[in-house]
Image (spheres, rainbow, N blue to C red):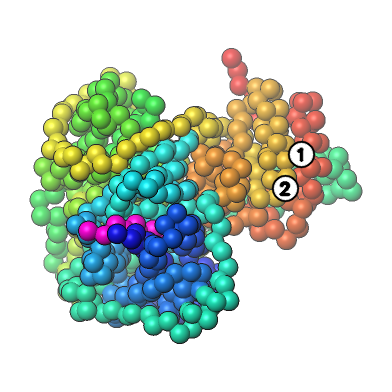
Amino acid sequence: MALTIISLIKQVPLPSEMRMGEDGLMDRTKAKSIINIDCQFGLEAGLQLRKQHPDARLIVCSMGPKSFETSLRTAISMGYDEAYLLSDRKLGGSDTYATGLAISTMLKHLGFSKDSKDPFIILAGRQTSDGDTAHVPSQVAENIGIPQATFVESVKADGAGNVIARRIIEGGYQILKLPIPCVISLTPTGIPPRKPSLSGAIKARTLNITTFGIDDIGLGTEKIGINGSPTIVVKVVNIVSERPPITMSEGHNEASLVDSLIANLKKGGNVLEKKEKTAKKEIERPDFPEKDYRNGAKGIITWAEVTNGKISRPSLELLTPARDLATQLGNDTKVLTLVIGKNVQSLAQTLIEHGSDEVILVENDKLEEYLVLPFSSIFAQVIKERKPEIALFAATTSGRELAPRIGMKTDSGVTADCTGLEIGEYIDKKEKVIYTPILESRRPTYGESKLATILGFVCPQISTARAGTFEVPQRVEGRKGIVSSFNPVLEHKDFVVEIIKTVRGEGGLQNLFDADIIITGGRGTTSDNLGLIQALAEALKSQGINAEWACSRPVVDEGIVEYARQIGQTGKTIRPKVYVAVGVSGAIQHLAGMKESEKIIAIDHNPKAHIFHNADFGIVGEYTDIIPELIERVKAGFKFGIEAKKF
């Protein structure tokens, strides 16, 4: 039986060409489009797998308008055999839940289900640049009923009906063994995608692309499109930097440039004039009846991710918005936290002292390490029993694959990577009703250039929160709460994925959240593998400064530095007192992770680098000249205005 390799791709607009329509939503009709970058790595992974299975059948699939045929033909020219497009106006406005449902229904129509006799592997990109959710691979896997691995760097078949995948986790990686069929989503750290061949381009011109409508695949309209989706986007606004104009260093060599920087820091640089807050424009509230759509659901549940026997910091951060939401909801709304693992009872009091009202424990020796299949099954069972109205997850690699799989099980929409959560209301002028209370989830999108407000209409309303966005709530020692146990029903199929190896170190992960100064190296500092970046951080540490080093995404993509040190939209969000960006271009995805820093210093050889538009102080120069000079100044006592730690 020949293996079938299916690659899911999406054609996405360039964020720089996106425009906002009069309705406050994004208009992509005139934007130039490309195959999503992560999807390109998924395509290449499929071609690499065929080297192991020369008789494998390669299929590429997409969902979207007829214009998506351009990307499908590109995949054919790279070496794929068949192309399928799901295109129907009734799919317009579908959220990720509806998208995952539609794509998986098309795949089932093509004969790919959990009961298929012929083996198949579904490949996808980690996430798309327009949405950045990373939801669809998990949703497709759940709807088909097969295992998955997301955030995968490399994949190969073992010849015995399994796939071996190397998956990124916080602070390291895991080697997983998954039985075929399965879904794998690829990060852009694998083998770079190849260029189309001449023979492939000729084939792509004439190949017939099969196009389906929803009627062709037997998909109804109840759960697709803007009306059937469990979530909707109600508002999109531009994200505007509020930093004052940059103060640039002046000088004819590295010594004078650094002297100028030190002088500017002492002066304090430009000060952003605080704008008076204007009264919020009151919108006339129509005299519509209020509707509580929760059907008895009440309470907020969070997931406490356990790594190395401890509760992860992002999981503790979740308790800040959870408590705020509980206060806004009132009526004795409780915050529940689910902890799954081996010998985790000792962690319950820590969660209670940080804000949980009840900690639900699931202890099982098989669950010492996170696995999406049993964890999603357990969570869905808890939701069914407790009926919470809101479920919150940290947007870690595990949280970002777990939440959408649970959402598919509970028919709930999921909002990814949120930076703001509050309770509001939705005025439905068409139905003449006001939905209240409702969770308003705000998240950056379209390459961090826009801020979208998303509402969910199915409980639990599920959101993931960007790590580093919320502060860890102050611990109240001795706070009282309930500790309960839950006994889930688990089956053999929940454990078909095997963790072969886990490699996890601190990798700077924890200290990136606590450091006073962070030195970050970008693509422009890779000539010495960030050696000078690390040396500057070490020099500061030797002076008693709580300093750490990090990197931008291109450095991780090139395999130079581990993912745990990545700052940005798909990495960590930090807010140190001083952030030094060296050789960082200033892509909006990177800015998302560091823009809350108190002071930002940019060093780059390109005077037109975008980073200078988002920094307080800047030096134009070669990092190989500037950083050694800074290291010498630090050794002589310069500390960027930060006081040394007192022991």
The residue that mark 1 highlights is 627
Tell me where residue 633 appears, x and y as whole percent.
79, 31
Q: Name the side, left or right, on which 28 lies relative to 323.
A: right
The quadrant in which residue 21 appears is bottom left
The residue that mark 2 highlights is 603
Q: Measured along the vertical axis of the image, is residue 456 above or below residue 225?
A: above
Give the magenta-colored segment's residue range: 117-126
- 605 or 209: nearer the viewer: 209
**Disc 1 packing (10 Å; few <14; some 14–19; many ≥20):** many
User: Residue shown at 21%/27% (left/top)?
Assistant: 363
Q: Which numbered disc flags the more N-terminal residue, 2 or 1?
A: 2
Q: Name the side, left or right, on which 128 lies relative to 359.
A: right
- 321 or 3: nearer the viewer: 3
Q: Amino acid at mark 2?
A: Ile
Q: Residue furthest right?
A: 252
The quadrant in which residue 126 appears is bottom left
